[in-house]
Image (tube, rainbow, N blue to C red):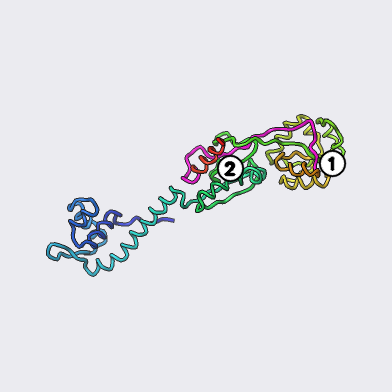
């Protein structure tokens, strides 16, 4: 939307209000830390820009004309508007306001983001938070495009964005205790080829990790792709096949015995925080420092 440029400046508006308040040019100049000549010139330009006579002399001082009195009300409101903008900017710098738009893969949104976001939200309660949960590559693409301020992903990301490794995630193979693979003392990729693999699908970053773990056997698997890792876990619990899931996501299931970890194959992957190369706003910069500081503890 096109906004017309006003015929006067903020400095002229301030000078007008100062003279209106003090009814004296020299005292107004002193309050603005300007010379009397500078304030006189500002008032002259302001009147000329508006096409109105705003002051008339009264002895050594000045007083508002009728037009000046009417304009002063609007001018004070305008000055307050500028002050509000200044206050808002200051609040954002102090993180008394602002927003943070984050993205996270389902694994990161479940296992890694909450414990990092909670202390930040407690420290800066007035910052508005928004989290998008999508596959890692989708998050990476949106961060790169500037649609998200920051993201938490597992696996690879675009090369032209900044990354910070915040954790290492162990991917383990699991199935139900009564599933045929559960009786084996050691599982090999050849064993896995004979049974249904419950995966996420090619759009999900974890599949690249599973491919690395299994090598050529990955392409010979019978797939049941369900997308979200929680759907994968639910299918494994029902005995529909074996799955590769983060150890943190299934440790309670393993402890209770409803799932069994298959011995012999596992894979480690990096959990990364990502952002654009260009500097962000105060909120993003503070959150990024917060993530980095967490690595020291």
Please report contact status of discs 2 and 1: CB closer than 8 Å, yes or no: no
Where in the figure is residue 132, as x and y percent of width and height? 61, 49
Disc with the residue nearer the chain's start (2 vs 1): 2
Quadrant in which the N terminus appears: bottom left
Frontmost residue, 136 versus 287: 287
- Identity of the residue furthest to the bottom in this view: 66
Residue 69: percent from left, percent from top: 26, 68
Q: Is residue 261 magenta?
A: yes
State whether residue 244 is above or below residue 41. Answer: above
* Left or right side of 221 for 138: left
Q: Please tell me the numbered disc located at residue 177.
A: 1
Picture residue at 75% right of the left edge, 47% below the top: 231
Q: Is residue 90 left or right of residue 224?
A: left
* Residue displayed at 15% across by 62% down: 61
What is the CA distance from the residue labelled 2 to the residue labelled 1? 36 Å
Q: Quadrant of residue 54?
A: bottom left
Residue 296 in the image: state x and y as whole percent. 55, 35
Can you tell which mark lies on residue 151? 2
- When the figure is inspected, residue 147 is found, relative to residue 24, above or below; the finding is above
């Amino acid at each position: 939307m096109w906004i017309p440029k006003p015929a006067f400046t903020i400095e002229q508006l301030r000078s007008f209000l100062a003279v209106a308040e003090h009814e004296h040019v020299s005292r107004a100049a002193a309050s603005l830390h300007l010379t009397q000549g500078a304030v006189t010139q500002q008032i002259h330009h302001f009147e000329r820009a508006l096409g109105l006579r705003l002051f008339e002399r009264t002895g050594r001082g000045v007083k508002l004309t009728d037009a000046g009195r009417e304009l002063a009300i609007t001018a004070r409101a305008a000055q307050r508007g500028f002050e509000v903008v200044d206050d808002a900017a200051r609040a954002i710098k102090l993180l008394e306001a602002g927003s943070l738009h984050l993205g996270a893969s389902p694994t990161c949104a479940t296992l890694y983001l909450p414990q990092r976001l909670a202390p930040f939200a407690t420290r800066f309660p007035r910052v508005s938070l928004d989290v998008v949960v999508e596959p890692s590559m989708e998050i990476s693409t949106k961060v790169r495009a500037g649609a998200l301020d920051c993201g938490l992903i597992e696996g690879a990301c675009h090369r032209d964005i900044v990354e910070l490794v915040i954790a290492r995630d162990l991917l383990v193979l699991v199935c139900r205790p009564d599933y045929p693979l559960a009786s084996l003392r050691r599982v090999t990729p050849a064993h896995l080829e004979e049974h249904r693999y419950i995966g996420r699908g090619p759009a999900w970053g974890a599949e690249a990790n599973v491919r690395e773990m299994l090598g050529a056997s990955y392409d010979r698997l019978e797939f049941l792709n369900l997308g979200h890792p929680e759907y994968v876990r639910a299918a494994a619990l029902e005995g529909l096949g074996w799955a590769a899931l983060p150890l943190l996501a299934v440790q309670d299931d393993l402890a209770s015995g409803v799932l069994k970890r298959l011995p012999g194959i596992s894979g480690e992957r990096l959990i990364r925080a990502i952002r654009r190369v260009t500097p962000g706003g105060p909120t993003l910069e503070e959150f990024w420092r917060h993530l980095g500081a967490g690595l020291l503890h």
